[in-house]
Image (tube, helix red, strand yellow):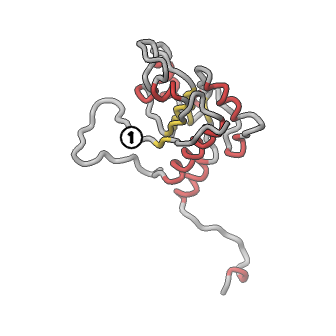
Amino acid sequence: MGLEDLQHNFLTGRLEDLVKWARRNSVWPATFGLACCAIEMMSVGAADFDISRLGMEVFRASPRQADLMIVAGRVSQKMAPVLRQVYDQMMEPKWVISMGVCASSGGMFNNYAIVQGVDQVVPVDVYAPGCPPSPETLLHAILTLHEKIRTGAIARRPQQPAGVERTAGWVPEAPNAVRVATPR
């Protein structure tokens, strides 16, 4: 008996794969543009780059409707608590892309007023380098995040390695870095 002899069509697969597919294709970003990188982030949503094909066409103004925060630009010490509050209000699972050298490491602003890396405030999943990074670089970071969602575990939290004590607060993982030359 072959498949052509069956009277009804059906599809088999793992429920976990279906959930990962749904999460990957419906990531909703929160609007959090802080500086010049935000212009490049906005251009990704325009017709030339069109992230609607990735299910991300609407940037959400409410953190309760978003599950991706793209931190685009430098983060000041006064903005850091607001950034953390927006992150805490986002629904689980949530992801963060650090866009630009200022968000990733403070950039050229090595002073007391600028946070030297947004990973001191929120856990970062993917870094998009550049000053400012091109829209292609942000698209590559988004696709890297999609791959991370596709291959990640959804049923369980990452376990603490043996011999490592749990400290209070957030313990960073090794994030995925995007290594793409700016094509322009």
What is the total number of numbered labels drawn onto the structure image? 1
Residue at 47% x, 43% y is 176
| Relative side of 21 to 5, left or right | left
Q: Position of residue 100 (x, y in %)?
A: 55, 29
Residue at 67% x, 84% y is 2
> In the depicted view, which residue is nearer to us: 153 or 130?
130
Tell me: residue 115, above or below residue 129. Answer: above
Q: Secondary structure at mark 1?
A: loop
Q: Residue furthest right?
A: 47
Residue at 75% x, 34% y is 46
Q: Position of residue 107 (x, y in %)?
A: 49, 23
Q: Residue furthest bottom?
A: 1
Crowd rating for badge 1 (residues with CA inside 10 Å; few <14, some 14–19, many 20+) = few
State whether residue 121 appears in this view: yes
Q: Position of residue 6 (x, y in %)?
A: 70, 79
Q: Position of residue 167 (x, y in %)?
A: 27, 33
Q: Quadrant of residue 27?
A: top right
Residue at 51% x, 36% y is 127
> In the depicted view, which residue is nearer to us: 119 or 15?
119
Task: Provide the residue designation for mark 1.
Answer: 173
Image quarter in which the C terminus is found: top right
Tell me: residue 158, above or below residue 81. Answer: below
Q: Quadrant of residue 42?
A: top right
The residue type indicated by label 1 comes to Glu
Q: Quadrant of residue 54?
A: top right
Tell me: residue 82, above or below residue 162. Answer: above
Q: Residue furthest left?
A: 163
> In the depicted view, which residue is nearer to us: 60 or 124?
124
